[in-house]
Amino acid sequence: MRVAHPTHPDPGGAGAGAEAWLYCAAMKHIGVLTSGGDAPGMNAAIRAVVRTAIARGARVSAIYRGYQGLLEDDARELGARSVANIIQRGGTILRTARSKRFETPEARAEAAEILRRRGIDALVVIGGDGSFRGAHRMHEEHGFDVIGVPATIDNDIAGTDVSIGFNTAMNVALEAVDRLRDTAASHDRLFLVEVMGRNAGHIALNVGVAGGAEAILIPERESDVADVADALVAAQERGKTSSIVVVAEGAVPGGALALQRTINERSGYEVRTVILGHTQRGGTPSTRDRVLASRLGFMAVDALLAGRTGEMVGVDKRGTVSVPLEQVWNTEKPIDEQLLELAAVLAI
Ligand code: F6P
């Protein structure tokens, strides 16, 4: 039976190239794992990896609890039905972990041995850039074929415009901001809303613009807390009775609570602080995240079966793309400068 290859067509038609591709699929046994912080949409990506692999004639095994589980040989071969009814679920059915031990060459050699015993010769790693470093080392040190699928709510992965989970996390945060606006307006209050993002301000910037925030504080731009307090007082003098300030968790030392103290001291405002924290990581993935995850999971398997390795799949203005894994952590993902500028203008 010949199967057409949709993304990497055989230049000579369904001839020898297509057969070579099928042969390649038949030989592959792909391990799939999620690693680092969970992100909504990871399950949709797992489903896409499993079903694409099986549809193409490859074998696929789940590796549970990321690299930690790999080191403990916590794995199981999956069938197409084993990923039924997960596309709509947040979190990751494979569970996840951050493994310190895997950072050592000795641990990675153990992992390679475990994978070989199971006959697994390729990995799809769904996670962030830390997870991709581990994958890259398995490729460099032990010759495994690896493809990364970007998944983190922080959206701090260079080489793709968006990562899986970012859209849902923004929607969760925005819903909270909208709710807080109701009570802020009723009490003439200022609310500080702290959102996640580790060292990146992508969630804060987008949610701040979409929520009509008075100010947005992000780690990529140094903020003088006193200046922010003064700007809020000035806003009140211009007639604003309530305000929302969106603060990225890494924006100011001590986070939103430290900012609250300074604003209280300088302005006498009645400030309330809400830290959204891990609520942003949970819940039903949005349509966008499910589609993105399905697309990237599918692409990851096709890339492996086409003989590609050491890459991350992603999306940008050109459509679907793949970039060398090393480029992911050697490149800084820029903040959207235009959003930053318009946020300031629209807050007058
Ligand atoms: O990277 C995702 C993320 O949710 C960050 O936004 C946050 O700083 C971090 O993980 C929290 O990590 P943990 O779940 O280990 O507390």
Image (tube, rainbow, N blue to C red):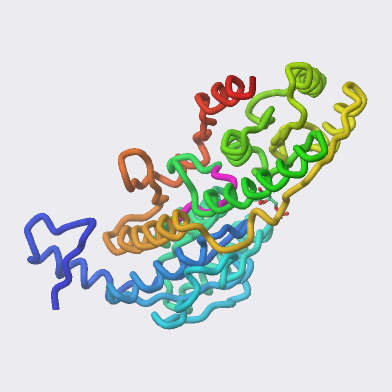
For the C terminus, which image quadrant? Answer: top right
Report if residue 160 is visible in the image: yes
Question: Which quarter of the figure is the N terminus placed in?
Answer: bottom left
Specify whether residue 186 is painted magenta. no
Measured as percent of width and height from the top left, residue 92 is found at 57, 67
Residue interval drawn in magenta? 148-155
Does the rendering let one see residue 200?
no
Q: Residue at x 16, y 57 (%)?
A: 9
Q: Nearer the viewer, residue 284 or 234?
A: 234
The quadrant in which residue 297 appears is: bottom left
Q: Nearest the camera: 137 or 13?
A: 13
State whether the magenta stretch is mostly helix, strand or loop.
loop
Q: Residue at x 55, y 53 (%)?
A: 168
Where is residue 282 drawn, in percent x and y? 63, 61
Q: Is residue 230 above or below residue 241?
A: above
**As drawn, is 36 to the left or to the right of 144?**
right
Residue 145, horizontal then vertical, whole percent: 39, 60
Instruction: Judge from the rendering whether residue 163 lies leftward or rightward of residue 197; answer left or right.
Output: left
Q: Residue at x 40, y 67 (%)?
A: 49
Q: Position of residue 281 (x, y in %)?
A: 63, 56
Q: How many circles with numbers are drawn on the protein?
A: 0
Picture residue at 81% right of the left edge, 22% below the top: 229
Above or below, 61 against 128 in this view is below
Q: Is residue 56 left or right of residue 126?
A: left
Relative to 288, is 106 on the left or the right?
A: right
